[in-house]
Image (spheres, grey):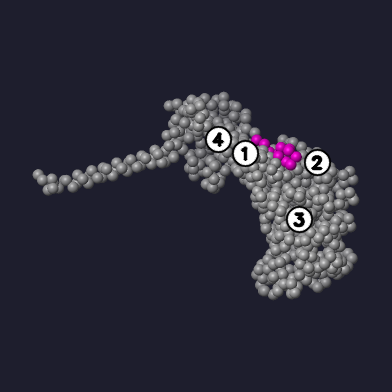
Amino acid sequence: MNSNNNPYSSRRYIIVGIIVVVAIIYIIQLFSLQILNPKYREFADSNAFYNRTLYPSRGSIYDRNGKMLVYNQPTYDVMMTVREMGKFDTLDFCETLNINMATYHRLEADMKDKKKNRGYTSYTPQLFMSQLDVEAYGVLQEKLYKFPGIYIQSRTERQYNYPNMGLLLGYIAEVDQRKMDEDPYYKRGDYVGKSGIELSHEKDLRGEKGVEVLLRDARGRIQGKYQNGEHDRSAVSGKDLKLGIDIDLQAYGEYLMQNKIGSIVMIEPKTGEILCMVAAPSYDPAILTGKDFSTNYLQLVRNPYKPLINRAIAGNYPPGSTFKPSQGLVFLQEGIIKEDTRFSCYHGYPPLGGRPACHGHASPLSLQYALATSCNSFFSYGLNYMLNNRQKYSNTAEAFEVWKNYMVAMGFGYKLGVDLPSESRGFIPNSKFYTKVLGRQNWNAHNIISIAIGQGEVLTTPLQIANFAALIANRGYFYAPHVVQEIKGGQLDTIYTNRRESGIDRGYYELTVNGMADAVTSGTCRGTYLGPELTVCGKTGTAENPHGDDHSLFMGFAPKDDPQVAIVVVVENGRFGATNAVPIGKLMFEKFFYGEVLPGDQYLEDMIANRVILPNVYIKNSRPKPIIRKDSISQNSDSTKVIAIN
């Protein structure tokens, strides 16, 4: 029969074609699985090899004087390879780890849940349980032969020499899925910085992981290193950090601020290094380590005084009268006033019927005397004259933009760039803001006069006020404040070495410095006077608070002609600046310059340290007693479970 007439001939070619296509598809699929797909190769390799991750030691942290603040101690993870697990006594395994069967099944389910553990495979070791202590590790190590498929992986855990600086140092915790998606360096069970320096310097501190390639036999048992370790890669330890913080100064500040809410920030003007950053309340960093992390963290979250907020950089406060030096500097630079310009004050600002009010002092008065006595009227007059000056500015909005730009140049209204997370920018309004809020274009100085004395819409952080004190101390420039002084084997960002100018003549700063020096010798800051041999310059502030008692503020620096330190103290609900912030400022100056409180001020130290200033709304029974003893300051401590306010 002629094949051309055979009805089955065409079908034969179709069948052969289908077979060829199917074969090609199988070949492509096999190539993809065995060559291109890393997961398949991982399955195959895992039968012969075990890649053990070598975790680096996290960098240690030291204070400016070389005292170790944070170090590492060994801890251990229990790893489980499901495919290698034969039958073993699960109850014995649980007793060895000191857990019950319910916990065992929960941990196993979490490990196998691909939503919680996206990298799960039954072929490779998976994290079953973390942070075994040395004792539990020893017990498990002795019995490991009884539990096939179980391995121990070593890593390190953070330890602290001082019960201070919890908010500043921050804490580390297990990495979440978002972080793993962002950075392939991290795998399930890894730990990462979550706050403070641990977060902002995570890449410096974490180091680089290593790997040890081990050979298995046919039953999955480890036989030793593959090719004598030729393919191993050593872990690289994280970089050590040296801070600008003085731990003795820091601990003393925390002692004075116990049972209070607020902040102390001290800066070295010549470098911008932060010498002390107290945010009250805080917590002992040791409580956020180990197995009790979740319990302790939840207690901190629920604490009504919010000890997880670093108020030094995230708290927003009206600066009150600490803002007045900035106003005088702008008025001088813009030619609104001169050194001998005088304004009247009759216990308040006359054009608005005595509002804002002022206390009694000589009148009329010049800028230097206005700074010493903290006169509200003087700076209200100055802002009014600036915003209404039509010879210099075409309208109020233009004048106000000039004012706003000076405030920004002096470090207000935007983040300063401190090397810590969660910094707030504060708030300096612009002309568009007032046009929108007031609902008209033709607003004037009297509508916003309170900003001249640091009230109204102006908000600042304690860090910004301390930086402003450093700016005045330097007579017109500052370096961005920073906590880390040195990264061993690394380099600081250039933002911390670039000098930032305010655009105001040095001579005007000299006049401002003289006014602040007078405030200490004969004005509102007399409580910080330390004698003629150590000239302190200061400025008090009493910031109105619609939610309770006014906030107490003090800003200053010393010595006058060779400034070594600038400071701000903020005590929420502390009322007048001279009542609480000023004595704390004095004691901190004494600690900085003399290393101890002067004999005549020991009564003042006891009074301030034992003073409780807390919002009554949070107090259910009675006010808590101070819990930080003076004799425990700056001592190595094993105490944990302690926070500054219960």
Type of amino acid at the residue the image marks with label 3:
Leu
**On the image, numbered disc 2 is attached to which residue?**
630
Q: Nearer the viewer, mark 3 or mark 1?
A: 3
Residue type at tag 4? Gly
Name the residue tied to disc 3.
471
Q: CA distance from mark 3 to mark 1?
A: 35 Å
First reached walking from the N terminus: tag 2 or tag 1: 1
Task: Return the x and y of residue 144 as percentages of the image width and height.
Answer: 54, 26
In whole angstroms, how far apart are the C-alphas of marks 2 and 1? 35 Å
The residue carrying pointer 1 sits among few (fewer than 14), some (14 to 19) or many (20 or more) residues within 10 Å by Cα, namely: many
| Between marks 3 and 4 in the image, the one whose residue lies nearer the viewer | 3
Question: Where does the image place residue 616, in percent across and percent down from the top left?
Answer: 75, 54
Instruction: State the residue position of label 4.
Output: 210
Q: Amino acid at mark 2?
A: Lys
The answer for how far apart the CA atoms under marks 2 and 4 are is 45 Å
Residue 238 — which label? 1
Label 1 SS: loop
Q: Is residue 273 visible?
A: yes
Disc on the earlier residue, 1 or 4: 4
State whether residue 380 appears in this view: no
Task: Indicate whether residue 5 is drawn in magenta.
Answer: no
Write the residue at 87% across / 49% down: 534
Task: Identify the residue shown where x is 50% and y is 32%.
Answer: 231
Alpha-carbon span between mark 1 and mark 4: 12 Å
**Of callouts 3 and 2, which one flags the residue occurring earlier in the amino acid sequence?**
3
Question: Regarding mark 2 in the picture, which secondary structure is present there?
Answer: helix
